[in-house]
Amino acid sequence: MIEMRRMYPIDKQLRTDTLALLTLVSIGILAPQAHAQSAQERILTDLRYLAADAREGRGVGTTGLDSAAAYVARRFEAAGLQPPGNDGFLQTFTIDPTAPAVAHSGLGGAAVKNVVGLIPGRGDLAGQAVVLGAHYDHLGLGGPGSLDPDSVGVVHNGADDNASGTVALIETARMLNRRSAPAMRTIVFVAFTAEELGLIGSDHYVKNPSIANDSTYAMLNFDMVGRLRDNKLITGGTGSAPELPQLLDSVNAGYGLTLSAMEDPWGSSDHASFYAAGIPVIHFLTDTHEDYHRTTDDWDKINVAGIERVAMYAADLTWSFATRSTPLTYVDVPQPVMATAGGSGAWLGTIPDMSSSPGGVRLTGVREGGPAQEAGIRGGDIIVQIGDFEVKDLYAMTEALGSFKPGDVATVTVMRDGKRIDMTVTFGKRGG
């Protein structure tokens, strides 16, 4: 997860189940060759592998991240998932060196991998998809994203962020692959890479989906689901479709979780990439804690029984999405305004593509009713000039906007289908 939220103390009692399981495994009572593993044992096995020191914090550019990708691919295969094409479970790509998200990180040009598997649909709904996702990367050996002082060079295992979500994704795949219906949507499982650098893996998947975005019914995202406390599960994104609150509550009738709904569908995790593409989303989260983005986020603090419970709930919710005959109604919720350099308050109302800067700022979309949309700018356009300012990247665009005030009028030049197009924009006010 790339954004810090409120912090809560850890309830140490929730470590009991995990430590008991570990003891049984360590003395051989729960040896895999002696019996079929339970769900909690499988979760613990997966968690310990992904959050081990040997994975080097699953940072981009580490061999540990590659090992984690290969492990998730094996687990997908063992769960009975099918690869989406002829190239196996790994969706390999290179991080664009011009991406704003990796500026000054030295990671531009790194080869990374999403892991993708699916349960094929059936009947009239087979051509549509429900996507479940979780990012499997973390902070590696510390650095700018770490909240531990002097932690550079120290492994950040990221057991909750987000080995917990990855193992929940794997366990949900195991559960759902045992189900079938005459008419069901294809269920796609994606373990995303490079989330901590700015949602790079999910951005790549949305641009290269297994099933087209306009045929994707909904996306459910696990990010930090390893610290279930007081029975509380946060469900973000409920404002992305009006049908979602009732559906969440209906499925929860069999679980009795304390759902804490958050309408905001943007957030700071991979579901935002899907929401920007016009897809309703749900983000599962058990909230942050004092180990967030610190070297102390280790596997022995994870509530394994809680992950199982979240996975069971998510599996039932996903199944309702996969078999539901009626559509969800996407709601365009304005993206929260972030403070920018310049401080003038001039607002254009664009959603920049953080994965590349192709000679300008490519847009993934524009805000409904915003200045850009009113001027005719649209998703896919590449902004190359604002007034007298040449726009080569997002930093240049931020500097250019800082020279304007709300109500100012300027010519914005975009590249569209290889042609330069000038449009007249009246800037709005941030937050207004």
Image (cartoon, grey):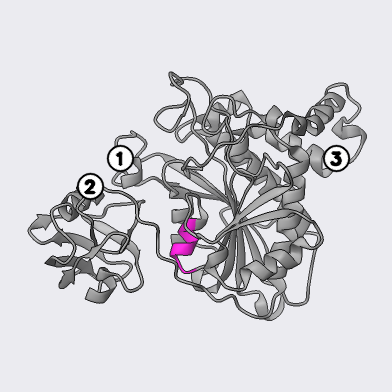
User: Could you tell me how far apart the alpha carbons at marks 2 and 1 are, in whole angstroms?
Assistant: 10 Å
Q: Nearer the viewer, residue 383 or 145?
A: 145
The image position of residue 419, as x and y in percent, is 18, 71
Name the chief secondary structure element in magenta. Answer: helix
The image position of residue 402, as x and y in percent, is 17, 52
Q: Nearer the viewer, residue 212 or 160?
A: 160
Circles 2 and 1, Cβ within 8 Å, touching? The answer is yes
Q: Looking at the rendering, which quadrant does residue 255 occupy?
A: bottom right
Q: Amino acid at mark 1?
A: Ala
Q: Is residue 237 above or below residue 11?
A: below
Which of pointers 1 and 3 lies earlier in the amino acid sequence? 3
Q: Which residues are magenta?
A: 272-278
Label 2 sits on residue: 395
Label 3 sits on residue: 37
Disc 2 secondary structure class = helix
Q: Amino acid at mark 3?
A: Gln
Give yes or no for residue 318 being in the magenta stretch: no
- Residue 225's disc number: none
Label 1 sits on residue: 103
